[in-house]
């Protein structure tokens, strides 16, 4: 019985995407190339609630460099860039608590619905917002 189940599982296509698929080397899987040619399909992400707290968004032009977001952030995620009077956000440490968004006086910060943030490098450009 167990052997039959094992064989069945081996012959089944996986129900999930390799994850995080965007970082898998094409030389190993060829998956992204196949997707681009329409020969394979990546399962679409699940629908998310409209008020999901996902990756932070930052509008540099609206930012006045007041640093209030830095003061309220409980996880020390936000760094100040004194030369530019702007900020850098290290998303890998963010707890998505929304406090920086609430306190920002100009509405420069927001939380998007992007939640597929897994990465092998916490300093990857995907996880830095500035
Ligand atoms: S959402 Fe919370 S943890 Fe993330 S940067 Fe803002 S204040 Fe910090
Ligand atoms: S609270 Fe808003 S305006 Fe102030 S530094 Fe942070 S992002 Fe910029």
Image: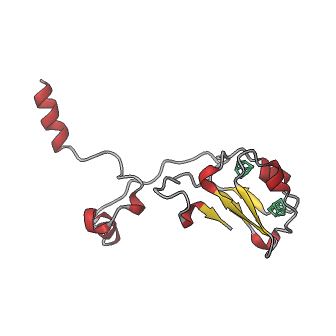
Please say which color scheme the image uses.
Answer: secondary structure
Q: Residue 99: percent from the left, percent from the top?
A: 78, 47
Left or right: 62 in relation to 6: right
Say which of 20 and 114 sits in front: 20
Q: Nearer the viewer, residue 101 or 113?
A: 101
Q: State how many labels appear.
A: 0
Relative image position of residue 17 (x, y in whole percent): 36, 51
Horizontal side of 130 relative to 27 (left or right) equals: right
Residue 10, image x and y in percent?
Answer: 17, 42
> Image quadrant of residue 128?
bottom right
Q: Where in the figure is residue 91, as x and y percent of width and height?
A: 62, 55
In the image, is residue 52 above or below residue 64?
A: above
Q: Is residue 115 left or right of residue 109?
A: left
**Closest to the observer: 55 or 91?**
91
Residue located farthest toward the front when viewing the structure as drawn = 82
Which residue appears at 58% of the width and 55% of the height? 114
Instruction: State whether residue 57 is above or below residue 86.
Output: above
Q: In this view, does 64 lie above or below 20?
A: below
Q: Which residue is drawn at 79% across and 76% down?
A: 83
State which quadrant residue 74 falls in: top right
Q: Residue at x 63, y 50 (%)?
A: 93
* Quadrant in the picture for the C terminus: bottom right
- State the quadrant of the N terminus: top left
At 82% from the left and 69% from the top, the residue drawn is 62
Residue 36 location, quadrant: bottom left
Residue farthest along the top direction in this orientation? 1
């Amino acid at each position: 019985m167990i052997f039959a189940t094992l064989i069945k599982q081996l012959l089944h296509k996986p129900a999930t995407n390799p994850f995080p698929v965007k970082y898998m080397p094409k030389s190993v899987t060829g998956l992204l190339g196949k997707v681009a040619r329409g020969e394979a399909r990546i399962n679409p992400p699940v629908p998310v609630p409209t008020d999901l707290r996902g990756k932070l968004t930052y509008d540099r032009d609206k930012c006045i460099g007041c640093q209030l977001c830095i003061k309220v952030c409980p996880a020390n995620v936000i760094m100040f860039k004194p030369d530019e009077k702007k900020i850098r956000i290290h998303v890998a440490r963010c707890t998505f608590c929304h406090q920086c968004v609430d306190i920002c006086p100009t509405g420069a910060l927001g939380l998007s619905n992007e939640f597929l943030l897994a990465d092998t490098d916490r300093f990857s450009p995907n996880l830095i917002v500035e």
